[in-house]
Amino acid sequence: MKLHSKVCDILEIEYPIVLAGMGGASTPELAAAVSNAGGLGVLGAAACQPEELREWIRRTRSLTDKPFGVDTLLPASVRRAAQMAGGGNPDADDPMEALKGHMAFAQQFMEREALKSSPGTPRREEGLPIFSKEFFEAQMQVIVDEKVPVYAAGLGNPGPWMDEFRYNGTKVMAVIGAVRHAVQVASIKLDVIVAQGHDAGGHNSPVGAMALIPQVVDAVGDIPVLGAGGICDGRGVAAAMMLGAAGAWIGTAFLAAEESGILPHQKEALVEGTEEGTVISRSVTGKPARIIRSKWTDAWEQADISPLPMPYQGAVAGPVMAAASRDGRADINPGFAGQGMGMIRAVRPAKAIFDDIVESAEASFERSKTYMV
């Protein structure tokens, strides 16, 4: 018997396995490899400037003739910040006032760790201010213009763009971490919902995947749900589907793919890591995210100041992460990962990872028959 579900028919893929749109990791090469293997590859385009995003989409099309997706962020906090900047809430604390002190904290950290910034190095942030309202809207215009097969909102509600997506034939997904958010996005009649639990890498939910998935399935009716969070092999896929999901959204397992866009020292950290090696921290993006524990996350845990909200914390962490990446410092920037990290044993081609997941899922379903008498 072959692994198959309703989501395969909706997304026009062979197996109900979708690559999580991990920023910086889910490159055109990785997305195309997953699509070519029979799943849905999704570009992690959260930090792509609009023209870079356009180039990524076109490069992916040159590498596969199969469906693929694009994942960006649509955080409501940024829209609220823009409204407040326009006079919507004059009494609110201004993160810009705190930014100077936080930048000084980051500079002291860099000096202590012998990290030097590289002012002459081109930055991804050149162009529109990254993670601003204008940045997100420009990204979305590129996605609409390019008529991508699938759009995934990694954070936030894609409702304002649904008419254009429907006109283009684009299938729409949203990643959520609570039942109330699932109900909200279900009301815009999107195609697939991703229920991502607390065990997932990156931005996730306060609720564990085992509890979240069935509750979301129950809440959204006929809309298929992909399970996410701690799923690194086919046993996790089968478990999610037994909870009512129609497949899985998988990130961490593919971070260790040869085609992944993360750096060699970050892939090494994944292979060496265990299930206890991650923490939830706001120290990189400003929103709670599961990250491999590092000197940077520890510094913020011990500090007498708190990280700033998105997008301001990114301005604080950006130079530190860039310098650590340049110097191969896995002790400072090992990257994001989920709690399934301990199942990663080696860096391998994406197709080998994908094929093992499918084989293991099918074997798990076959093995489950032994429990019925």
Image: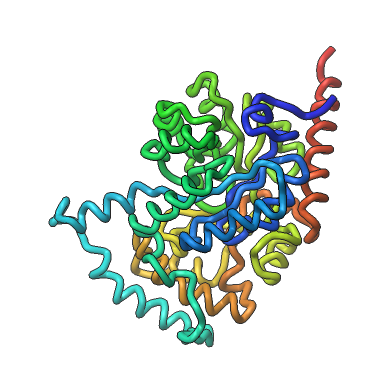
User: What is the quadrant of residue 199 in the picture?
Assistant: top right
Name the one closer to the observer, 169 or 204: 169
Q: Residue at x 61, y 67 (%)?
A: 334
Residue at image x 58%, y 30%?
225
**Measured from the top left, where is residue 157 in percent x and y?**
41, 39
Is 287 placed above or below 177 here? below
Count every numbered label the image shows and give the total.
Answer: 0
Give the left or right position of residue 77, taking residue 27 as reference. Answer: left
The reply to whether residue 174 is in sight is: yes
Quarter-of-image position of residue 355 = top right
Between 321 and 223, the one lying in front of the other is: 223
Quadrant where the N terminus sits is top right
Residue 292, placed above or below residue 190: below
Q: How is the image coloured?
A: rainbow
Q: Relative to 305, say whether 339 is above or below.
A: above
State the image coordinates of residue 65 (x, y, percent, origin top left).
71, 45
* Drawn side of residue 268 relative to residue 131, left or right: right
Q: Quadrant of the C terminus?
A: top right
Give the image location of residue 361, x and y in percent.
78, 34
> Can you see residue 279?
no
Q: Residue furthest top?
A: 373
In the figure, 134 relative to 223: above or below? below
Tell me where residue 188 sits by quadrant. Answer: top left
In screen coordinates, is 87 left or right of 161?
left
Q: Position of residue 308 (x, y in %)?
A: 34, 63
Residue at (61%, 55%) from the top-left corner?
58
Give the residue displayed 81% in from the left and 24% down from the top.
Answer: 368
